[in-house]
Image: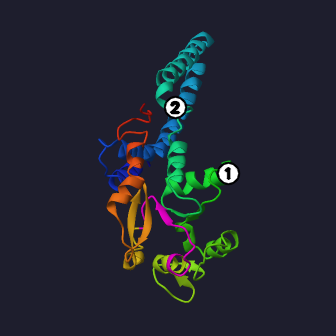
Amino acid sequence: MIFTYQIFFSWRANLDVENDLYLGVIERFYMQTDIGVIIFVATGYKDLILYFKKYLNNTIIYIFKAISILLLLFWQGKNFDLCNFSNTSVVTDYAKLVMDTIPHNSTIFTHGDLSATTIPYLQLCENYRPDLKIIDMELMTYNWSVPRLKNTIKSLEFPAEQWHLRDTETTFTLNRFLKVNIFEKETTPGVYVCIGAHQEEISYQKSFFLLPIGVCHQFYPKDNDISLVSYIQKYGYLYDSWPYSYDSKFVVEN
């Protein structure tokens, strides 16, 4: 089982382990197989104890148990600092930094595990930036999602009942949504996506392009003029003020 599992995920996760981010992704694939190893070790340990009870006296058994406990404590102490992330706030810092870069009353489309979990959590559980309208792009593909969004985000207009790659009477594309809410409703603040738009949903490219705003992007109309000087003056500080370097290992730079 373990061998088959490792072969499959080694094939699917053929990533560069020299990159810390990719290394972290690959390390996750070993968690399930570690459970199998733990089960085998626990079963073997139990059989070994039963063998000792059958052929050895109790003193030897107690010594063996004491050595086992000491080994566990030794390895736990040796690797505790490596595995202790109780004081790490990089995920929370990321979400707050992202939300702080977005203008008041804007709409954020979340894409990917990191943004789709951290950003809504801060808003719903800690009431951080309640002015933002946060929408999970993937969830809009379900038929129950958009009707609920219509009831909770009344300032936005959803042109149909479900997000899809094609426009129909009951489905809408991202381009259609943006045109309705940006072109037809002039009072609608900016619409942003974090992190990156859906790779297969490229309908927005007919009328919009992605303007980088920190780690997010704004859907910017192609027909609108943009001054690169003003853009750099307005958002250039975001890249200089980012507290984590590429290889910082979650250590905040001073």
Residue in view at x 53 percent, y 51 percent: 100
Q: Amino acid at mark 2?
A: Gly
- Residue at the extreme top of the image, as rendered: 59
How many residues crowd mark 1 within 10 Å: few (<14), some (14–19), many (20+)? few
Applied colour scheme:
rainbow
The relative height of residue 50 versus residue 32 in the rendered view (above or below) is above
Residue 30 at x, y = what percent? 44, 43
The residue singled out by tag 1 in the image is 127
Farthest residue, direction bottom: 169
**Rendering coords of residue 229 (x, y %):** 33, 58
- Residue 52 numbered mark, or none: none
| Boundaries of the magenta span | 182-198
Q: Is residue 151 magenta?
A: no
Q: Nearer the viewer, mark 1 or mark 2?
A: 1
In front of the other: 44 or 124: 124
Relative to 111, is 166 above or below? Answer: below
Q: How would you classify the magenta stretch by its main secondary structure?
A: loop
* Percent position of residue 125, x then y: 68, 50
Residue 44: which numbered mark, if any? Answer: 2
Q: Quadrant of the C terminus?
A: top left
Q: SS for tag 1?
A: loop
> Total label count?
2
Q: Residue sitting at 39 percent across and 51 percent down?
A: 4
Left or right? Give the position of 204 relative to 168: left
> Regarding mark 2 in the picture, which secondary structure is present there?
helix
Name the one closer to the observer, 143 or 75: 143
Under mark 1, the amino acid is Asn
Q: Label 2 neighbourhood size at 10 Å, few (<14), some (14-19), many (20+)?
A: few
Q: What residue lies at 45% left-to-right and 34% top-to-bottom? A: 252
Residue occupying the point 51% across, 55% down: 115
Q: Nearer the viewer, residue 83 or 231?
A: 231
